[in-house]
Image (spheres, grey):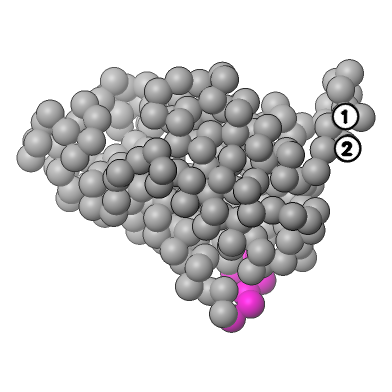
């Protein structure tokens, strides 16, 4: 099984559904330490991403089909940035643009797929100084991509690759409950920010679990 535009579309649609189902929970988590709108923001970002890849009979369907995987990923990044605002816009958009920078084909094996996600994270790092332990989405994203990187030498299947990423993202998200926030509005709470999960890390874990379940079904 290879990573293709078709698989990307299925993964993004699944991630959108997962976020939509947990919208209230994500906003509630964010309300404990922030503005209470993370769920709304990440849902808008995923809708923007899906709008680029879905082929639903729109007038530009033929044009969409002719776009390369690289072009599609870059377009997703810019669409997210144009349709959302705040840190969600910057980080999510940067990730997809970064992914596009390492892609040169239309069918990627697991090693190339891992490299594509590594490139996405590298681009996010140019916009965020947050690291694991700072109680942000990076507590889930960095471990997820790290898990992919660790498997590259074994030439895993795509299902194995994304399962490892999803497990690592979930563990990272769970760890944020005991952390004190170091960025955003939550930083002002200091030690009082402990005891709640970070909404960004939780949404990241939801997205990677949706990716994993999609790949598992498709293999």
Residue 18 quadrant: top right
| Marker count (numbered) | 2
Q: Are marks 2 and 1 in contact (CB under 8 Å)?
A: yes
Residue 158: within the magenta?
yes
Q: Residue at x 16, y 33 (%)?
A: 187
Tag 1 secondary structure: helix
Can I make out residue 210 in this image?
no
Label 2 and label 1: CA atoms lie apart by: 5 Å
Question: Label 2 belongs to which residue?
Answer: 66
- Quadrant where the C terminus sits is bottom right
Q: What is the residue that sits farthest to the bottom in this orientation?
A: 154
Q: Position of residue 4 (x, y in %)?
A: 77, 52
Magenta span covers which residues?
154-160
Which of 75 and 53 lies nearest the eye of the viewer? 75
* Residue 137 position (above or below residue 59): below
Label 2 environment density (alpha carbons within 10 Å; few <14, some 14–19, many ≥20): few
Q: Residue at x 23, y 36 (%)?
A: 183
* Residue 6 position (above or below residue 37): below
Q: Which mark is residue 63?
A: 1
Q: Which mark is residue 201?
A: none
Q: Residue at x 62, y 26 (%)?
A: 79
Q: Position of residue 67 (x, y in %)?
A: 82, 38
* Residue 104 position (above or below residue 61): below
């Amino acid at each position: 099984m290879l990573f293709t535009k078709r698989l990307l579309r299925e993964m993004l649609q699944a991630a959108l559904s997962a976020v939509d189902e947990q919208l209230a929970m994500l906003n509630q988590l964010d309300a404990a330490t922030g503005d209470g709108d993370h769920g709304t923001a990440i849902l808008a970002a995923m809708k923007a991403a899906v709008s680029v890849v879905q082929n639903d009979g729109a007038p530009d369907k033929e044009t969409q089909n002719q776009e390369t995987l690289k072009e599609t990923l870059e377009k997703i990044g810019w669409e997210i940035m144009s349709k959302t605002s705040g840190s969600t816009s910057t980080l999510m958009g940067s990730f997809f643009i970064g992914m596009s920078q390492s892609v040169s084909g239309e069918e990627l094996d697991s090693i190339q797929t891992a490299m594509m996600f590594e490139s996405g994270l590298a681009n996010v790092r140019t916009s965020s100084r947050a690291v694991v332990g700072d109680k942000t989405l990076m507590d889930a994203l960095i471990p997820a991509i790290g898990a992919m990187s660790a498997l590259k030498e074994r030439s895993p299947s795509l299902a194995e690759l994304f399962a490892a990423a999803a497990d690592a993202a979930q563990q990272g998200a769970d760890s944020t409950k005991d952390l004190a926030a170091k960025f955003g509005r939550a930083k002002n709470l200091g030690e009082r920010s402990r005891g709640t999960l970070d909404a960004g890390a939780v949404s990241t874990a939801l997205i990677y679990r949706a990716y994993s379940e999609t790949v598992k079904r498709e293999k």
